[in-house]
Image: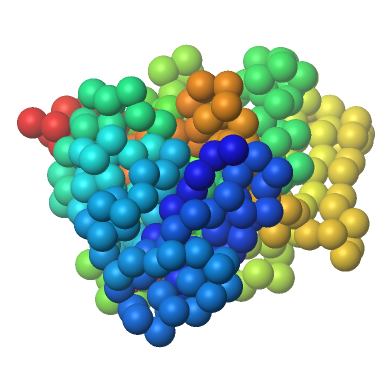
Amino acid sequence: MTRCATISGRGMGMMHGGNFHNHPDAEVVAVCDMDPELLAKAKEHFGIPGYPTIEELLANCDPDLVLLIVNETRRIPPLRQLLEAGQNVFTEKPLCGLEGQERLREEDLGIAAPAIATWRDSNLKFGIDFNYRFMHHFRKLHDDVAEGRLGEIRMVHARAHFNCWSHVIDQILWTVGRPEWVSVVGDPNESRGWGRLIHIGWENGVIGSLSGTNLWGYDDHPLRVKVLGDEFYAEAKGLEGSYSRRKANNSEIEEVWEAEQDKPEMPESFKRMADGVIKAIHADTPFPADGEAAWNELLFEAAVHRSALQNNARVFLADVEEDAFA
Ligand SMILES: NC(=O)c1ccc[n+]([C@@H]2O[C@H](COP(=O)([O-])OP(=O)(O)OC[C@H]3O[C@@H](n4cnc5c(N)ncnc54)[C@H](O)[C@@H]3O)[C@@H](O)[C@H]2O)c1
């Protein structure tokens, strides 16, 4: 039985806590929230002890796993504290920055880098909730690429509303790999969230594009990722979930999958992620989306920011990474 402690008595924290608590091989044994009212409610909900600070939590219980579901603007200090105390950690996305319109700035990478270095130097497990990896349609797209069903990959075409921004980046990186460079049109100094058109290049010659804004709504799906190979192309889109695979240079359908109307993929994906995390603890393997996935998403965003500030310059992720650890 994996003993978990949950930090946050708010919505997302309670949801993750519930999913781990309901898992047959895990239980939540303690909660932590600095807000006394939320702490009291969480203690009552799970019928377990609770603490207002991480120090008190760690002094009174030694969990196998800490669910750190605090907001991303104040996640790095407690993450470092937990890793330095030898705790395995599962956290929400993005690792840091500001969710929504503004998103990550390159300065944020320097804040996150020491936490990543601490984790890399440890034998601890650390993972992030890129739960879209557990949506059926995105997994199908990923597996198409991993198992060579599209032929040789040539292009990626993606777009997202900013509510899904870190997820769309993770999807591209998870499915196609970490890119070599980005080149970006957009003005980070725009006051109401900057729209961005991103060109992406991989070392193996694959090219791609990703555009982001929240000027469009959810009517035509908040995110879409299309991967084009020389034999087939496939697209996964939306949060309810749909997927199709077609012949290259042809619209003949090879496969179509749609989530049933009363069974959207989103809530299930959180439960499947909890299951993946618990299985990884038992099998002693990395978490389904580990610290490298968390880091690479931030790195991509920082490169995007740098490129836009440099008037569309081609920015190499390796250079941004080197500067962050300098
Ligand atoms: N994966 C997804 O699809 C998805 C969907 C929605 C939200 N999220 C993410 O979930 C995260 C959490 O969202 P939220 O709105 O519930 O966060 P929140 O900031 O509203 O709640 C965090 C809670 O943790 C407590 N807290 C913060 N720091 C603490 C500390 N050091 N010690 C003790 N208590 C502390 C706060 O008092 C608060 O009650 C966000 O990062 C958001 O991006 C992810």
Specify the color scheme.
rainbow
Tell me which corner region of the image, top left, top right, bottom left or bottom right, holds residue 39.
Answer: bottom left
Tell me which corner region of the image, top left, top right, bottom left or bottom right, holds residue 112.
Answer: top left
Q: Is residue 114 visible?
A: yes
Taking the image as shown, residue 207 lies to the left or right of residue 184, namely right
Q: Residue at x 85, y 53 (%)?
A: 259
Q: Residue at x 65, y 69 (%)?
A: 218
Residue 6 against residue 35 in the figure, above or below: above
Residue 145, percent across and down? 67, 23
Q: Residue at x 27, y 45 (%)?
A: 82
Residue 273, percent across and down? 61, 44
Residue 121, percent across and down? 23, 23
In terms of depth relative to the viewer, which is nearer, 81 or 92? Answer: 81
Q: How many marks?
A: 0
Residue 73, percent across and down? 28, 63
Q: Residue at x 84, y 33 (%)?
A: 246
Taking the image as shown, residue 171 lies to the left or right of residue 232, namely left
**Quadrant for ligand 1?**
bottom left
Residue 74 against residue 253 in the figure, above or below: below
Quadrant in the picture for the C terminus = top left
For this orientation, the residue located farthest to the left is 326
For this orientation, the residue located farthest to the bottom is 37
Quadrant in the picture for the N terminus = top right
Taking the image as shown, residue 121 lies to the left or right of residue 178, namely left
Q: Is residue 313 visible?
A: no
